[in-house]
Every structure is written in C-alpha cells, then in structure tokens.
C-alpha cells in the first residue's frame, strides 16, 4: 500500500464514521407507537359530583358496571380536543356491539363557559351516546387529582382564553377503578384492540 | 411578433397557482368541521416555499371569522397546550405543514354556520409581500388525520 492509497483509506474511514450517525440516527419520538399504560387496581375512585349534558348527576356510581374512557378538555379547543373526540368516535365505530360495556365521557376543565347545553351539542356532534360532563372546579378536582390529570386555565387572557390539559384518555374499569391511560396521540385501531382484549377479562 | 409578449404573459398567468412575487403556494387547505355552536375552529394547510428566501407569515384574516390567529399545539409530558405565534417562517426551499396536533390557524367566532363542503376564504399576509388568498374547504374530522399501524 502506497501513501496515497493509505490516505484515501483513512479518508474513507473518517467519512464512514460521520455517515453512520446520519443514517442510523434515531427516529423522532413522534413516530413511536402510541401506547396504553396499564395501572394495577387501586380501589374505587373518590366521591365527586358532576353533571352530564342532561343535567343528571355524574358521580362515581356512574362509573360502576362499565368500562369508561375519560377525556378532559374544553369546547373552545379547536385542535387537540376535536382530534381526540374524532378518534374516540372511530373507536366507537370499530367496537360495534362491544360498546354496550363502554362509556365515552368528555369532561370539561372550563365549566365557566361549557354549560351542559354546550357540552351536549359538542359531544352529540361526535356521537349521541357520548357523555358531556362538567361541574365546579371543587368537584372536578376530586376526580382530576385522583387520576393525575393536569389542567390550567389561561387566566391572563380575556374573552377567548385557552387551557392546558392532559391529552391522554383515561381508562376506568367497571369497579370504578383507574386502570390505565392511552397516551396522545391516540390511535383508534390500537385503542379498539386493547379495549376488546380488556373486556374479555 | 408584437403579440408574443402578450401570449407569454397569458401563458404564465394561466394554469399556475404559484404566487408570482414570492413563489409561495398553498396545498390542501381545509377547515375542520366543528360541533354546532363552536366558536373556535381550526384550519390546516401546507405552505410551500420553493424560493431561495425564507418567507414569514405575519397575519391571517377571513371574511367568515372575526379573527384568525396562528397557533401551535404541543404535547409535552402528556400535557396539551396551545401557543399563539406572532409569526411563522417558511424556510427557503421548504414547507410549513399545518396539521391536527401541531401548527394550525385558529379561527375565532364564525360569522355563519359552516358545514362540510363549505368554502372558507383565508388571506395570508407575508412580511414584505402582497397577500395570498386561499380557499379552504370545510371537512369532517376524518380517520385519515392519524397515521395507522
């Protein structure tokens, strides 16, 4: 090997070393499989008293006897909330008959603007069986704290204020126990497959 | 031969959606159909910038809404939040995708009820350039907004 060949060889190795991380760089986390995190049963959720869109009491008793999918948001949310509710609508379509053991509940973190009437027309747009639930922060917080749901209303803004809120869909079992969460962005097929499997338990 | 420049202008004008001054163009503009009574909607689109200079979107207006704001949603540690952007730069020879769960145009206080199929006119104002008019179509949130596995 002469000097020139040696230099070219070194150069090729250096180029290869730089190329490896370019070609094998990890994919951004956005492409990761959306997941269900299961939580071991820890007993019934604490007492709380909210109202559904028909102004009927929605409390822990309403969580017994069915699997519940709870999503916390608000109707002045133009992007994440309709996207998630549209996914839940797809889950509902995919599950067909199996929906008789599942309830879909949209819970507002913005009760000042989201009256039962507004919640009714909002959830009804996605599916007539979806529940729209709300109530005073004092009652809402009993449920959000038990589930580790975060929300924060933007109190600086006047008029059209916004809210930050947990993006996950929370899973509650027929004993009213928190059993898991579907992280955002949710995938309807993935959720439906998991819900079918869970119902066989 | 005197007609040639006129013919050229005509040819250049016809059949192109490219915005002549900035070369920006918009694809797949749509508005997510909202539940009845909703006062806040979102529009999505792709702004492509084939030009050699970055272009900055500074404001958007629509005759169908009281106001339009540029926003981005993000989910950090499981928390969804929205941030209003003062402006948004479309890189040179690049594009900006507005899509559910990310950048979007927030449409405030619709002046009429909008249903799937309705057109919504949007005027995009870029820094140092004339406005770009776009017609977005109202669509029902569909299954294809998510990647399927």
Image: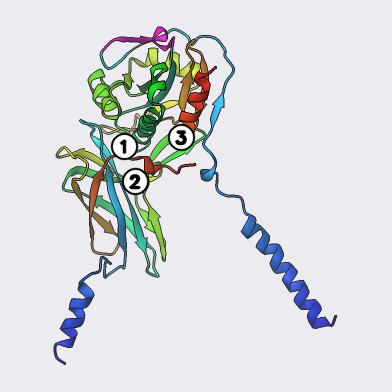
The mark total stands at 3
The region drawn magenta spans A55-65
Circle 2 chain: B
- Up-down relation of residue A20 to residue A185 (above or below): below
Q: Which residue is mark 1?
A: A78
Q: Residues within 10 Å of mark 2 (few under 14, many from 20)?
A: many
Q: Position of residue A41 (x, y in %)?
A: 57, 14
Q: Which one is nearer the viewer's eye here, B99 or B106? A: B99
Q: Which residue is mark 3?
A: A189
In the displayed image of the protein, which residue is found farthest to the front?
A97
Q: Nearer the viewer, mark 3 or mark 2?
A: 3
Q: Which residue is mark 2?
A: B104
Element at label 1: loop
The quarter of the image holding the N terminus of chain A is bottom right
Same subunit, labels 1 and 3: the answer reads: yes
- Up-down relation of residue B71 to residue A164 (above or below): below
Residue A113 visible, this angle: no
Q: Mark 1 vs mark 3: which is more N-terminal?
A: 1
In the displayed image of the protein, which residue is found farthest to the bottom?
B1
Residue B118 visible, this angle: yes
Circle 1 chain: A
């Amino acid at each position: 090997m002469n000097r020139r060949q040696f230099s070219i060889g070194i150069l090729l190795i250096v180029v290869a070393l730089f190329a490896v991380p370019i070609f094998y760089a990890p994919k951004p986390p956005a492409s990761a499989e959306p997941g269900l995190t299961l939580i071991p049963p820890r007993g019934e959720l604490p007492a709380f008293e909210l109202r559904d869109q028909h102004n009927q009491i929605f409390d822990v008793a309403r969580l017994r006897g069915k699997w519940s999918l709870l999503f916390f948001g608000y109707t002045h949310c133009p992007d994440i909330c309709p996207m998630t509710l549209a996914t839940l609508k797809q889950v509902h379509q995919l599950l067909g008959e199996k929906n008789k053991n599942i309830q879909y509940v949209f819970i507002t973190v913005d009760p000042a603007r989201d009256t039962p009437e507004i919640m009714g027309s909002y959830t009804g747009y996605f599916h007539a069986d979806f529940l729209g639930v709300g109530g005073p922060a004092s009652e809402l917080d009993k449920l959000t704290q038990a589930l580790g749901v975060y929300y924060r209303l933007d109190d600086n803004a006047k008029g059209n204020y916004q809210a930050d809120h947990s993006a996950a869909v929370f899973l509650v079992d027929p004993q009213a126990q928190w059993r898991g969460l579907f992280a955002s962005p949710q995938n309807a097929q993935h959720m439906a497959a998991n819900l079918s499997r869970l119902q066989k338990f | 031969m005197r007609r040639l420049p006129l013919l050229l202008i005509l040819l250049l004008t016809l059949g192109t959606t490219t915005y002549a001054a900035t070369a920006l163009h918009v694809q797949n503009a749509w508005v997510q159909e909202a539940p009845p009574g909703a006062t806040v909607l979102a529009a999505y689109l792709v702004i492509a910038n084939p030009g050699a200079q970055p272009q900055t979107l500074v404001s958007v207006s629509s005759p169908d809404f009281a106001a339009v704001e540029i926003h981005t949603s993000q989910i950090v540690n499981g928390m969804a939040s929205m941030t209003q952007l003062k402006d948004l730069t479309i890189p040179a020879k690049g594009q900006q995708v507005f899509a559910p769960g990310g950048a979007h145009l927030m449409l405030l206080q619709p002046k009429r009820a909008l249903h799937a199929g309705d057109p919504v006119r949007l005027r995009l104002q870029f820094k140092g350039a004339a406005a770009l008019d776009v017609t977005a179509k109202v669509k029902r949130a569909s299954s294809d907004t998510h990647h399927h596995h």
